[in-house]
Structures are given as structure tokens and as C-alpha cells.
Image (cartoon, rainbow, N blue to C red):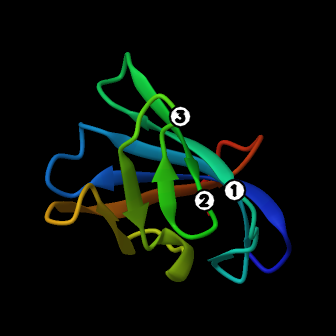
């Protein structure tokens, strides 16, 4: 991943990989998020329901103006490789660890 390319990153919650799967489309260069703008993504809550969000430049996960809850993540600060983990803080006391399970170029069926 040395050129700017668009990828889909999928990560699973380490505590229960079948709940709240994390999906985000982003640009990657040298295994880092190369875009410094807001990025759209979603949590696949149970295979039938999604919870869309915007990953803000400051690492805040924003669910929209109707939902005052703001989560945060360190995803913008880690090396993006399959198997690496990142944190999502749900509030000041509760957080979850997510593991990157797939990074695929958009339009391809193969993992990088």
C-alpha cells in the first residue's frame, strides 16, 4: 500500500466478533490513514441493522445531530495492518478493543 488508494477496512470487536462490526472506507498511504478530512463509516450491529457515523479529524465518532453521544478512537494514529488493534472509547469509563480483520481495495474481492 504505497500509493494513495481507496480501501474498505473491517474490524471486529475483540470481546464479541459477531457484534458491532466496524466498517469504514478510507484512503491509505504507507499503512496510515492519508485523508485528514472526515470519513464515513458504520457499525454493523447484528447483520441486519447498521449505525452510520462520521469519523472526525480529531478521532471523534459522531452519530449525527440527533445523537448527542460521541465516541472516540485512536484509529487515525495506528499502523493499518490486518491483526493490529485499536481502541474505541464509548464514554469516559468504557472502551472496547477492535481488531482489523480485512483491508480491501474498493472494487476488489481480495484482501491486502
Q: Quadrant of the C terminus?
A: bottom right
Instruction: Check whether the beta carbons of the residues at disc 3 and disc 1 lie within 8 A of each other.
Output: no
**Camera-side residue of 21 and 35:** 35
Q: CA distance from mark 2 to mark 3?
A: 14 Å
Q: CA distance from mark 3 to mark 1?
A: 15 Å
Residue found 64% across the figure and 78% down from its top = 32
Residue found 35% across the figure and 44% down from its top = 69
Q: In the rendered view, does 111 fall on the left or right side of 93?
A: right
Report the number of numbered marks: 3
Instruction: Check whether the beta carbons of the residues at disc 2 and disc 1 lie within 8 A of each other.
Output: yes
View extreme (top): residue: 48
Q: Quadrant of residue 1?
A: bottom right
**Camera-side residue of 100 and 75:** 75
Q: Quadrant of residue 95?
A: bottom left
Q: Report the residue marked by disc 3.
A: 65
Q: In the rendered view, does 82 fall on the left or right side of 48?
A: right
Q: Secondary structure at mark 3?
A: loop
Residue mark closest to the camera, 3 vs 1: 3
**Camera-side residue of 73 and 13:** 73
Q: Residues within 10 Å of mark 1 (few under 14, many from 20)?
A: some
Who comes first in sequence, dot 2 or dot 1?
Answer: 1
Q: In the rendered view, does 79 fall on the left or right side of 101?
A: right
Q: Secondary structure at mark 2?
A: loop
Q: Report the residue marked by disc 2.
A: 56
User: What label does residue 101 carry, if any?
Assistant: none
Who comes first in sequence, dot 2 or dot 3?
Answer: 2
Task: Find residue 20 and report its horizontal and vertical position in percent.
Answer: 31, 39
Residue found 34% across the figure and 63% down from its top = 99
Q: Report the residue marked by disc 1.
A: 38
Task: Find residue 7 and report its horizontal and vertical position in percent.
Answer: 69, 55
Amino acid at each position: 500500500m504505497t500509493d494513495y488508494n481507496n480501501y474498505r477496512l473491517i474490524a471486529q470487536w475483540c470481546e464479541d466478533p459477531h457484534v458491532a462490526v466496524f466498517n469504514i472506507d478510507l484512503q491509505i498511504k504507507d499503512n496510515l490513514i492519508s485523508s485528514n478530512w472526515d470519513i464515513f463509516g458504520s457499525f454493523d450491529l447484528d447483520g441486519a441493522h447498521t449505525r452510520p457515523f462520521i469519523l472526525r479529524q480529531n478521532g471523534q465518532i459522531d452519530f449525527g445531530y440527533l445523537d448527542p453521544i460521541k465516541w472516540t478512537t485512536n484509529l487515525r494514529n495506528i499502523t493499518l495492518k490486518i491483526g493490529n488493534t485499536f481502541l474505541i472509547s464509548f464514554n469516559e469509563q468504557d472502551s472496547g478493543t477492535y481488531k482489523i480483520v480485512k483491508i480491501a481495495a474498493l472494487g476488489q474481492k481480495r484482501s491486502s
